[in-house]
């Protein structure tokens, strides 16, 4: 029986294909992200107006979605008009000429307003919580990659890039798990090897499995101290918590009875409203009821749409953005280190902020070792800078 492989051997499979990802240098044009914007289930960039102007195609799509109820309201309005014009003059019961019919709608209109307000507010609260979670899920992989790139020495460059690959795969794994939609895995095919991707897709809880891999990679580093490990692990734990919050939002919708009762209330309200409008507007009640029902049903439709925020948020765009951000962090690692080193040297000659000019009435302070012996402190500061301390730990020349 062979010897049990060590930690370095177990991690070698994860680091073997890291360099190829960065060498490919994938490009994602901005127009591609717009293809995944989900507003009214549309997928065409031409449907969106960045200037906030009218969007006829979107309006037509909304009319199409709400056409059954709008057609019902127009049919009831036409029936009321035909009844009042053709049947009521021949002795049929008078049910269309009483202006008092408007009183029940005046008394119940506040209830419609409250129902719509609570409906849209609760749905928007879920949407905003999901959007905030997505924003933080965008940040944490980028932060953990940046910390690993800054703290790990060049000898562990392969380990840093491996952490970056798995960090870039966190969002696709999370969104595929939350939405139960395999289309999000397309964003991980570029950062993970086929073997890694098959293993991750086979896990029952893919995002947590990817977090476990990152934790193993961090623990495999021999250069990180306990504080640095804790900082990176904190980003891993925060991402874990955000996935749990996304699960709660997607798995627990607003109670169905609340949605059904609001819909029933609106349907009853707009169905009987033509009887109260006919004595006031006559045949003009048809277009009035058409517009009014479109607006009321549109508000209800907005609440239903944003009640499930992970169906309307541009999750594919988040995946592409995280992958690009991690890639740039790794590509700029050496350049950022060189700029930081050069900035430390430039601080010697470029003093900022400038020293404040002494005031005439300022009382002299007690003597300090620096006042008594300025030159030795200068030499000590230069010696600290020579061994690579941070620039703000070295004092510039007077």
Image: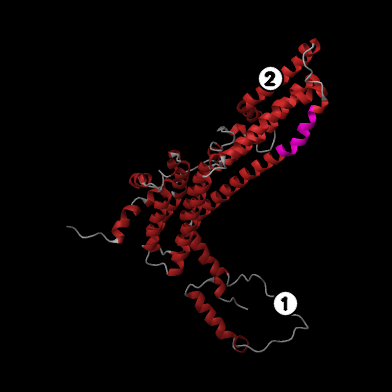
Does the residue at mark 1 contact the one at mark 2 (Cβ under 8 Å)?
Answer: no
Residue 252 lies left or right of residue 303; in this view the side is left
Residue holding disc 1: 357
Q: Quadrant of residue 225?
A: bottom left
**Can you tell which of label 1 and label 2 is closer to the viewer?**
2
Q: Residues within 10 Å of mark 2 (few under 14, many from 20)?
A: some
Dot 1 or dot 2: first in sequence order is 2
Q: Residue at x 49, y 45 (%)?
A: 319
> Separation of disc 1 and disc 2 at Cα?
83 Å
Residue holding disc 2: 75
In this orientation, does residue 55 appear? no
Q: Residue at x 54, y 49 (%)?
A: 134
Name the spot of residue 154 as percent of width and height, x first: 40, 63
Q: Residue at x 47, y 58 (%)?
A: 237
Q: Magenta region: which residues?
A: 101-112
Name the spot of residue 130 as percent of width and height, x first: 56, 47
């Amino acid at each position: 029986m062979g010897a049990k492989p060590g930690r370095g051997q177990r991690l070698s499979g994860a680091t073997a294909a890291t360099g190829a990802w960065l060498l490919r240098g994938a490009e994602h044009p901005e127009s591609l992200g717009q293809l995944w914007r989900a507003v009214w289930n549309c997928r065409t960039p031409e449907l969106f107006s960045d200037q906030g102007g009218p969007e006829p195609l979107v309006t037509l799509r909304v009319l199409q979605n709400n056409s059954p109820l709008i057609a019902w309201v127009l049919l009831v309005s036409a029936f009321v008009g035909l009844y009042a014009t053709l049947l009521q003059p021949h002795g049929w019961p008078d049910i269309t000429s009483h202006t008092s019919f408007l009183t029940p709608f005046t008394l119940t209109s506040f209830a419609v307003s409250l129902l719509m307000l609570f409906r849209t507010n609760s749905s928007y609260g879920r949407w905003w919580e999901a959007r905030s979670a997505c924003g933080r899920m965008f940040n944490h992989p980028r932060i953990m990659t940046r910390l690993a790139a800054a703290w790990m020495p060049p000898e562990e460059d392969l380990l840093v890039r491996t952490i970056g690959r798995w960090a870039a795969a966190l969002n696709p794994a999370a969104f595929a798990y939350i939405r139960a939609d395999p289309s999000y895995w397309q964003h991980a095919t570029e950062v993970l090897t086929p073997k890694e991707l098959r293993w991750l897709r086979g896990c029952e809880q893919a995002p947590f499995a990817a977090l476990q891999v990152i934790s193993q990679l961090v623990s495999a580093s021999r250069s990180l101290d306990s504080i640095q490990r804790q900082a990176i692990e904190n980003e891993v734990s925060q991402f874990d918590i955000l996935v749990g919050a996304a699960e709660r939002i997607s798995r627990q919708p607003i109670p169905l009875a609340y949605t059904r009762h609001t819909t029933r209330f609106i349907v009853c309200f707009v169905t009987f409203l033509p009887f109260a409008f006919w004595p006031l507007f006559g045949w003009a009640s048809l277009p009035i009821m058409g517009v009014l029902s479109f607006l009321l049903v549109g508000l209800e439709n907005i609440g239903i749409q944003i009640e499930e925020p992970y169906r309307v948020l541009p999750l594919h765009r988040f995946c592409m953005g995280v992958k690009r951000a991690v890639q740039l962090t790794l590509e700029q690692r050496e350049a950022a280190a060189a700029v930081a080193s050069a900035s430390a040297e430039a601080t010697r000659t470029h003093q900022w902020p400038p020293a404040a000019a002494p005031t005439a009435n300022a009382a002299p302070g007690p003597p300090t070792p620096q006042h008594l012996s300025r030159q030795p402190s200068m030499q000590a500061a230069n010696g600290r800078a020579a061994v690579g301390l941070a620039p703000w730990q070295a004092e510039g020349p007077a």
